[in-house]
Structure formats: C-alpha cells, structure tokens
Amino acid sequence: MLIVMQHNALPGDIDRVCGVIRELGYEPRAMPGAERTAVGITGNDRPIDADRFEGLPGVREVLRVSSPYKLVSREWQPANTVVTLGTGVRIGDGSVVVMGGPCAVESEEQLMRAAEFVAATGVRVLRGGAFKPRTSPYGFQGLGLEGLKLLAKARERFGLAIVTEAIDAESAQWVAEYADLVQIGARNMQNFALLKQVGRLGKPVMLKRGPSATIKEWLLAAEYIACEGNSQIILCERGIRGFDDSTRNVLDLTAIPVAKGLSHLPVMADPSHGTGRRDKVTPMARAAVAAGADGVIVEMHPEPERALSDGAQSLHPGEFASMVRQVAAVAGVLGRGF
Ligand code: PEP
Ligand code: MN
C-alpha cells in the first residue's frame, strides 16, 4: 500500500502516517519525490484498512500496489531510477550506456589490450568475468581473485568502471570490494540467498534475466535485492531459451519495453549471450537501443579465436568500435545522449 501525501503536507503529517503504520506492526518507507512524498508499507501479510489513513491531515490518496513486486514497481515509484557507478557513469537517465570487454579475464595481457581498446572507443564500463559460471565443469572457471585484481588494474590505468559477476557468497564479498557494478548472472537469478546478500553489499547490482524466467519472476528477483535496502539495480535482458537452435538464445526485445513499463529500474540488453553469434550481435545491439534499452553490454576480445570462453559471440576490436558507432547513431536518432 502507498499513502500519497499532498504536495504541501507538513513533516508532522508524514510522521503521523508513519506512526500509524508502526502501530499496525509494519515498517513505513517515506519516499520524498519531486512532486510529492509517498509513504509505502511493505511486508503486510494481510490487507490493511485504507480508512486508517484516508482521513489523516495531509493525505491525498491511498493506493493499493497490485503487483506482487512492490519496491521495484512503477506503481510504487513512477520516476525512473538512475543507477550511478563509482566513476560517475549514470545508467537510466535517458542516455545510452555501452559496457564492453571479454567474457572472462584470461591474463593481464589479454585484459589490458581489451581495456585499452574499450576505452579508446569512448566506452566507460569494462566487463570481464573473474568467477565464471560455466555450463561444463571442464570449461575455464575464471582466474578468481587474481582476475579481480587485474580488473582493478585496468580500472586504474584506463579510468573505466568495472562490472563483473559474483557466483556465490564468497565471491560476492570479493566482487563488492573490487567492482563498481556487481553482476548476478542468468543462472543465479533465483539464487535467493545470493540476491539477499548482494542487497546488503552497498554496491549497484546488474541482475540478468534467467534463461527460462518470466518477467514477473525476474522482477520478483530484483525485489529480493531491493528489500535488503539496495535500490541501485539494473535489469539485463540476455536472451531466453527457445526451440530454434539457429541462435544460442532468443533475445527477448519485447521484454525491454515491458520491464520498463512495469518497473522504474533501468533495463540493459546483452546481445552477445542473447544471440551467441558474433555476426548477430551488432544488429541486436541496435535493435535493443531502438526498443528503449538504457544500454547494452557486449563481449569483445582482442583475439576471439583464442578466447577461453564465448569466443564465437565475442566481437573483434574493429567490430566493437563499429557497433559502438552504430549504437550511438541509433541513440542520436532517438534524441538520446550517449
Ligand atoms: C556473462 O556475462 O559472461 C554470463 C555468463 O552471462 P549470463 O549469466 O547472461 O549467461
Ligand atoms: Mn560470456
């Protein structure tokens, strides 16, 4: 339930509303906005009588939040959330953000070459997995902590923000220490213990959509993070499982406007995992931005043929630069910054 205050409500009116919520045994969340303050109630396991609030001074209206996810819903917060990374990069403010880099951190030489190239294209966020959730136990599992240290070095050298994945409780602690943005991968979208933990780490989180998750399940997963007090969440559509093996996944472009309609959180797209094929990545990056994505995260490798993971979907450096130019052009047509 959301109690919307009149724009000229006094602080005492808001305190009174919060007091009634506490009397009912729940925790109020006051959300001051540009036009009005709203006070939310979460965690209620039974319906609350709106009469308790409707007559109070300063109250404009009492709204029921009908979606099962509350904090991340547009009903709860009509204005877009803007996620700000440690380096000052903003995601969700209407501009288009590109994140790029290798699937996995493989060596210092590989990462520095990739980072130098990413920075030279004007991209300000470097991706690279240090902890890799691989389909096969025989696949390259990542350099772990050593990979994070290399990412930190690239951050220093090229002034890039870092996004990298946490796969479990232990890696989440490390990732939060080194990265600007903590990625929760598709396979962990419903790892609720991990979601709760990253909700408490104090770093922005990028939550990828599970390969078979509905949009509702994805938003409920984001709600787990928000419930722990972390509202700096980015959603990332990365393709869902389909019946056609022409591509690795089906990049669900429709999910972008749907998620943006249902939630105030920024929505990114990952056309690399969404297609699995290098030659399909740039067209789908363009399409994702045209569909309203707040940005794209794209895999590139200095030598994709030698990549230890996801080489087939990793762009060559020249292709990456071309993708960035095309995405910027689409952003320009839409009157969006880049
Ligand atoms: C990745 O970003 O390299 C990755 C493993 O992504 P996803 O979780 O979407 O498969
Ligand atoms: Mn990958």
Image (cartoon, helix red, strand yellow):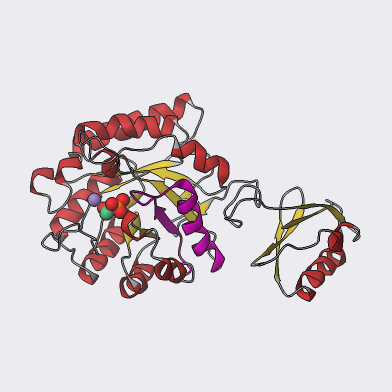
Magenta stretch? Answer: 202-228
State the image quarter where residue 122 is shown: top left
* Residue that sits furthest to the top in the current view: 333
Q: Is residue 226 magenta?
A: yes
In the displayed structure, 305 sits above or below 32; it is above
Residue displayed at 82% across by 70% down:
20
Where is residue 3? Give x, y as percent: 77, 57
Quarter of the C terminus within the rendering: top left
Q: Is residue 223 magenta?
A: yes
For the image, the number of numbered tags is 0
Where is residue 177? Give x, y as percent: 37, 71
Frontmost residue, 17 versus 34:
17
**Residue 311 in view:** yes
Where is residue 258? Give x, y as percent: 51, 39
Left or right side of 237 for 23: right
Residue displayed at 39% across by 27% down:
329
